[in-house]
Amino acid sequence: MKILARFILVFFLVGMISCRDTKAEEEANQAAIEQIEAVESEVEEISKKIEEEANEVENSLKELDSI
Amino acid sequence: MKTTKNMLWAFVLMIFVSIPTMTAQDSGALTNEIKKEKSDLDQEKDKMKDKAKDKADKEKAKIKAKEDAMKDVRGDMKSDIDKAKGDAMSAMNDGDDKMKILKEKLAKAKTDKEKQEIMKMIEAEKKKTTGEASATGSATAKGEPSTGEDSDATTATGSNDNNDYDEEEGKGDVLKGKEYGIAKANKAKAKVEKRQKDLEDKKALVKNGRAKIAAAKERLAAAVESGDLSEDEIARKQKSIERAEASIDKLEASITSGEAAYSKQKTTLTELYQDKN
C-alpha cells in the first residue's frame, strides 16, 4: 500500500512537472514566433518605404534628362 | 277518318325515321371529311417528325464529332499532365531519401545550432525538390520555367494560427513548436538577407543619381554662361536639380537606417533560438 501511494505521488509529480514545462516552452515559442512576425512586418515596412523613395528618385532623375 | 289518322301517324313516323337517317348521312360525310383532314394532318405530322428527326440526327452527329475532337485534345493534355506528374514524382522521390536522412539527423541533433543548420539543409533540399518538380511540371504543361518564389510559396506558409509549418505540402508532415519557430526564423532571415541585397541596387541608384545631378549641374552652368536660357528656365531647372538632390538624400538616409535595421533584425533572428539553449 505504501509503495503504491509513493508510486502515485511520484507519477502525479512527474505529470505536474512535465505539464508545466510544456506550457512554459509553448509560451516561449509563441513569444519567439510573435517576435519573428514583428521583425518580418518591420522588414516589409522598411523595404516598402525604400522602394517608394527609390521610385521618387527615379522620377526626379528623369526630369534632369531634359536639362 | 281513321285511315287519315293512320296515314298521319305513318307520315310522322316516317319523318321520325328519316331524320336520324339523314343526320346519319350528314354525319357520315362530316366524319369522312374529318377523317380525311386527320389523315392529312397525320401525314404532315409524320413529315414534320421525319424532318425533326433528321435535324436531330444531324445535330447529334455534329456534337459527337465535337466530343471526339475534345476527347482527343483531352487525351493529349492528360498524357502531358501524366508525363509532368511522373517527372515531378521522380524528382520528389529522389529528394525524399535525402529528406529522411536529414530528418533523422534533426531528431538526433542535441543543440539548437545543430538543429538550425540541419533545418537550413532541409529548407535547401525542399526548395531544390519543389523547384525541380514545379520546373518540370510547369515546363511540360505550360512551357514556362518556374521561379524560386513559387517554391517558397508552396513550401512555407507563415501565417498559420496553429503554429504548424507546412514542411511538405500534400504529404501531411508538419513542423510544430520549436521546429516551426526555427524554420520560420530561418525563412525570415532569408527574407532579410534578400532585402539587404536589394539595398545594394538602391545604393547603385544613389550613385548614378549623384553622377546625373553633377552632369546636369555642369550642363546648366554651361547654358547659363552661354546665355541661352531665360531666368525662368534657369530657376525651373535649378529647382528640379534641388528636388532630385533632396530625394536622393532622403533615399540615402533611408538606406543607411534600413541597413542598420536589417543587420539588427538578422542578429535578433539568429540569437532568438540560440539564447534558449
Image (tube, coloured by chain):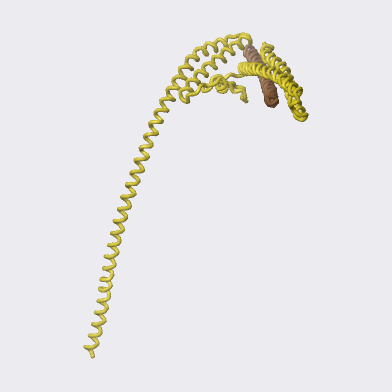
Q: Position of residue B208 (x, y in %)?
A: 68, 18
Q: Position of residue B219 (x, y in %)?
A: 72, 21
Up-down relation of residue A56 to residue B111 (above or below) = below
Say which of B150 and B142 sits in front: B142
Say which of B235 and B129 sits in front: B235
Q: Quadrant of the C terminus of chain B?
A: top right
Q: How many marks?
A: 0
The picture's colour for chain B is yellow
Query: Is residue B256 rendered to the left or right of residue B11?
Result: right
- Residue B107 picture quarter: top right
The picture's colour for chain A is brown
Up-down relation of residue A64 to residue B108 (above or below) = below
Residue B127 visible? The answer is yes
For this orientation, the residue located farthest to the bottom is B1
Query: Is residue B245 rendered to the left or right of residue B109?
Result: right
At x 24%, y 79%, the residue is B14
At x 76%, y 22%, the residue is B225
- Residue B81 picture quarter: top left
Q: Quadrant of the N terminus of chain B?
A: bottom left
At x 41%, y 30%, the residue is B74
Say which of B184 and B175 sits in front: B184
Q: Position of residue B67 (x, y in %)?
A: 38, 36
- Residue B38 picture quarter: bottom left
Say which of B172 and B139 sits in front: B139
Up-down relation of residue B248 to residue B97 (above or below) = below
Q: Position of residue B218 (x, y in %)?
A: 73, 20
